[in-house]
Image (tube, helix red, strand yellow):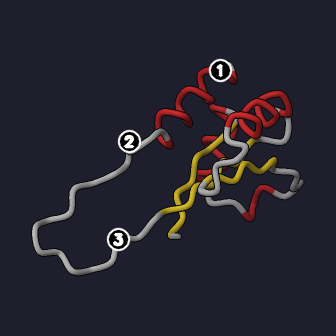
Amino acid sequence: MVEFACIAEMALGLLGSGSMAKERPAGANAPRREHQWVILVARDQSDLYTHLRDAFRGDPKVQVILDRRDNDSRNPSWVNERLRAYGAVVIRTPG
């Protein structure tokens, strides 16, 4: 299992200031959509959950959730694979 410090660093890098910002083409009239982020943490990674929750406290665009469900079949397979491999998965949702 990857150490939670590596996951936290990856999440901070993905969600850091302007890291995902894209330049809009000149004259683009469409309103810019802000994205929200969900960090889903595997249920056996309570230390990682605590660390990420504290790291993103106060950031209204990030929600850290501990996956407490016993039935993984409700998750898409790619989510389950990342939860098993890394202990967490970062999911971008439309704002």
Count of labels in the image = 3
Quadrant, the N terminus: top right
Mark 2 element type: loop
The residue identified by callout 3 is 32
The residue identified by callout 1 is 5
The amino acid type, in three-letter code, at marker 2 is Ser
Q: Quick one: label 1 or label 3, which is nearer the N terminus?
A: 1
What is the CA distance from the residue labelled 1 to the residue labelled 3?
32 Å
Relative height, residue 69 to residue 45 (above, below)? below
Mark 3 element type: loop
Q: Nearer the viewer, mark 1 or mark 3?
A: 3
Q: Residue at x 84, y 41 (%)?
A: 43
Neighbor class of circle 2 (other Cα within 10 Å; few <14, some 14-19, many 20+) is: few
Q: Position of residue 7 (x, y in %)?
A: 61, 29
The amino acid type, in three-letter code, at marker 3 is Arg
Relative horizontal placement of residue 15, taking residue 50 as reference (left or right): left
Marks 1 and 3 in Cβ contact (< 8 Å) = no
